[in-house]
């Protein structure tokens, strides 16, 4: 599973740190751009296996990604 965060996205920090701590075996990176600019400016965003995941805040983003990990 590949999880990517955009370097420019303001909501990435907390979700990124928590995921790296809890799932060190996963391929989690912060990239300079994940090519989702319109969404990236508006709210926390990541891609999970190239699928866009958005949320209202960093905690919600973390929970959505965690659910995807657990279901796989």
Image: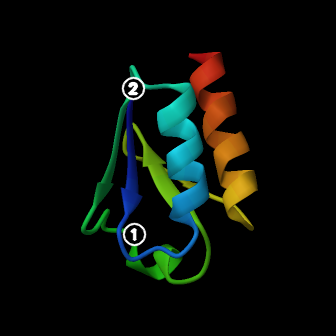
- The quadrant of the rendering that contains the N terminus is top left
- Disc nearer the start of the sequence (1/2): 2
Please determine whether, in this image, residue 5 is positioned above or below residue 72.
Answer: below
Residue at 24% across, 68% down: 32
Determine whether, in the image, residue 31 is placed left or right of residue 12. Answer: left
Q: Which mark is residue 18?
A: none
- Number of disc labels: 2
> Answer yes or no: do the residues labelled 1 and 2 have beta carbons within 8 Å?
no
Q: Position of residue 38 (x, y in %)?
A: 46, 81
Residue at 65% across, 33% down: 66
Which type of secondary structure does the marked residue at label 1 adopt? loop
Residue at 54% across, 38% down: 19
Q: Residues within 10 Å of mark 2 (few under 14, many from 20)?
A: few
**Closer to the camera, 58 or 47?**
58
Tell which tag, 1 or 2, sits nearer the viewer. Answer: 2
**Closer to the camera, 41 or 30?**
30
Q: Position of residue 70 (x, y in %)?
A: 64, 19
Q: Which residue is mark 2?
A: 26
**Closer to the camera, 68 or 51?**
68
How much space separates mark 1 and mark 2, taking CA atoms? Answer: 22 Å
Q: Which residue is mark 1?
A: 36
Please determine whether, in this image, residue 39 is positioned above or below residue 66.
Answer: below
Which type of secondary structure does the marked residue at label 2 adopt? loop
| Residue 11 found in image quarter | bottom right
- The quadrant of the rendering that contains the C terminus is top right
Determine whether, in the image, residue 66 is placed left or right of residue 45. Answer: right
Residue at 65% across, 46% down: 62
Q: Position of residue 20 (x, y in %)?
A: 47, 36
Determine whether, in the image, residue 57 is placed left or right of residue 36. Answer: right
Please determine whether, in this image, residue 62 is positioned above or below residue 39.
Answer: above
């Amino acid at each position: 599973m590949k999880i990517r965060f955009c370097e420019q996205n303001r909501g990435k920090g907390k979700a990124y740190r928590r995921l790296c701590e809890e799932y060190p075996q996963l391929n989690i990176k912060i990239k300079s751009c994940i090519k989702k600019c319109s969404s990236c400016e508006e709210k926390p965003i990541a891609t999970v296996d190239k699928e866009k995941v958005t949320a209202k805040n960093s905690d919600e983003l973390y929970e959505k990604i965690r659910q995807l990990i657990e279901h796989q």
